[in-house]
Amino acid sequence: MTTATTALLGVRHHGPGSARAVRAALDRYEPGIVLIEGPPEADAVVGLAADEGMRPPVALLAHAVDEPSRAGFWPFAEFSPEWTAIRWALAREVPVSFIDLPAAHSLAMREGEDAQEEGAQEKGAEQDVRVDPLAVLAQTAGFDDPERWWEDAVEHRGAEGDPLGAFEALGEAMGALREAYGDGGHPEDAVREAHMRLRIRQAAREHDRVAVVCGAWHVPALAGKTTATADRALLRGLPKVKAEITWVPWTHRRLSRSSGYGAGIASPGWYRHLFTAPDRPVTRWMTKVAGLLREEDLPVSSAHVIEAVRLADTLAAMRGRPLAGLSETTDAVRAVMCDGSDIPLALIRDRLVVGDVLGRVPDGAPAVPLARDLAREQRRLRLKSEAAEREVELDLRKETDAGRSRLLHRLRLLGIGWGELIPSRSGTGTFRETWRLSWEPELAVQVAEAGIWGTTVRSAATAKAEDAAVGATGLAEVTGLAERCLLADLPDALPTVMRVLADRAALDADVAHLAAALPALVRAVRYGDVRGTDSAALEEVARGLAERVCIGLPPACGSLDADGAAEMQGHVRAVHQAVGLLGADELGERWAAVLRGLAERDGSVPGVLRGSATRLLVDGGRIEGEEAERLMGLALSPGSAPQDAAGWVEGFLSGGGMLLVHDERLLGLVDGWLSLVPGSAFDDVLPLLRRTFAGFEQGVRRTLGELVRRGKAPQAGDAAGFGAGLDVARADAVLPTVRLLLDGSVGERGWHD
């Protein structure tokens, strides 16, 4: 709508058609000032939009100074009408200002959590009102799909005609909708529109022509006849907080409606293509699709592109559309390039229709000191922020990779989830780490929140670790924190963590707590060795905990129910591994004595614990096969309860079934015991055994079944479970390959020689 001094340009946020129309309208109207729907605090940073280092998508981030989690985003894409208006004004040195309700009020009017989830003032008529105006207009025009109607009516409309007239028509349509459905929408609408009217009046007094770019839904309210006194009355007494604002990178994926963004669009990548393509948008789009499919090794040729373009244009003509839209191009790609399959289409939608474009803001943008230090560390370590998920392999023996690891671990300590540590596929050595990285815009809020702990990543992580240690409620929590401090290389935090750890360990008499805390502490000792940090104090505490576990474990294993026994079994195995990492010395001998004591205990200790202790002794070479056979014979004797015996078998075999394959005597004992289980107890025993044997590898299960089916033990000299005698000819057949692998180190004589 246009008055004597003001042009109201109602837009759809993030609509390329609206962006083109706004640009054309501004060229025609030549305003003396441009007003944008957005927080007025952004006037201080709007000039950065002209910086060469600024690349959309970006967003204005406002947050409460005293409570950074209370924050809101105002996103802009390259094809957003507001961004187009800002760039137009800055290029012509025309004043540009934001006129929406100040962030100081809007952030105070809602809870911090809601503000973050809803985006504070994430612009969009779809979010602001209960009725979807696009859906109503599309239905009125005879369309069942609002997106398709919008494409036909706006996005595919050429630049011909009067651009201001198009906005007049859209404003009249929104006026009719508000008259039919009422103005009731978001509770903040009334005060927001009152503030915008006051700012428009002020600009009209100072400039001959004023252009206002805002959501189309607000146009009727801004053009309505109200008094300044009434508007000021609506704004009187609003709550207020101290707020700061800056620019942060945004992503196309976060512009997508599927992300939960209220003003989201279904296809930001497609809209960007429509806005930036200089000509033949359908042909250029099909070329992009073909390039993506070729990168995935799918056979797509130039002929496919030509046929897909022809089919898309034909579909558009048959459907009465001015230009092939996303639905026509998708149907053509499915038929021509994907052979009717929707699987490649999912890739096209993810990579092109939505996309992972990440914006960039200039270095001069205001930021909390912690964010600046993080940016410096990223540049120093050459670790860029990228929206697309990627995996990074780190070799901690290299200085740069070790620095990257320290940074990522410090950020995790601060609750900034840029990276997720995942199992490495390159090996299991402690000098390797694999991280899955993905930078989401919300991380900017997390960085602002973490700024209360310090001005640098290292100092903030140190302060956060010390506070977490003091506030920890369990011993395992403190030991885990000590491990994380070593991973993050925070030596200044370790004295506090160690003091709390020593105090908690001295007061905690629960063996389960001590056992749960020990593995993390031992890992910390090992990581200290790998990373070159001093972990002597941690090792001393770890050995003290291990000694206390050795003393308290035997009595703690008595009279446990099934769940308690299963939990204690996990603790026993974890402690066994931890003691092994600490070294084979007096502590190792003492732990072996504890395991032997558990293995030889009577029925007061659950069978699963006695069997597990026996297996650990066998695997560690502490007892021979005959001793293991004796203990198994006692556990599976007719005098033992079937369920207790089944628990013993479960504990003994939880380390794997290869022991039964290579020791026919143990297999015979299990087979004989199982054959004698009374029918009345078999139903209770079967689930335990099925769970045990289901954990074996398929080849082990097959071999065990074959041995039991044959019903006889292998002959002396045979390879147990694999047949009678050695097939010399088949053994010699592998020699050329083995000789090649070992570089000729195997002689000409066969292995059997």
Image (cartoon, rainbow, N blue to C red):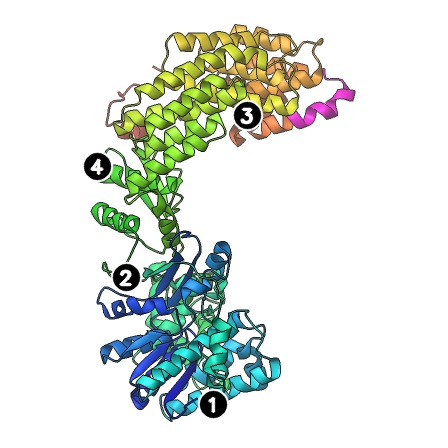
Front-most of residues 279 and 579 = 579
Q: Tell us which disc is closer to us: 2 or 3.
A: 2
Which amino acid does the dot numbered 4 rest on?
Answer: Glu
Say which label, 3 or 1, has the lower sequence index: 1
Classify mark 1: helix, strand or loop: helix
Q: Residue at x 27, y 27 (%)?
A: 533
How far, Cα to Cα, is label 1 from label 4?
Answer: 63 Å
Which amino acid does the dot numbered 2 rest on?
Answer: Val
Residue 144 against residue 593 in the figure, above or below:
below
- Mark 1 crowdedness (10 Å alpha carbons): few <14, some 14-19, many ≥20: few
Say which label, 2 or 3, has the lower sequence index: 2
What is the tally of numbered marks visible in this picture?
4
How far, Cα to Cα, is label 3 from label 1?
Answer: 80 Å
Say which label, 4 or 3, has the lower sequence index: 4
Residue tagged 2: 361
Classify mark 4: helix, strand or loop: helix
Instruction: State the extent of the magenta-drawn residues as a range.
Output: 675-688
As for residue 631 lying within the magenta part, the answer is: no
Q: Tell me the quadrant of the picture where the N terminus can be found.
A: bottom left
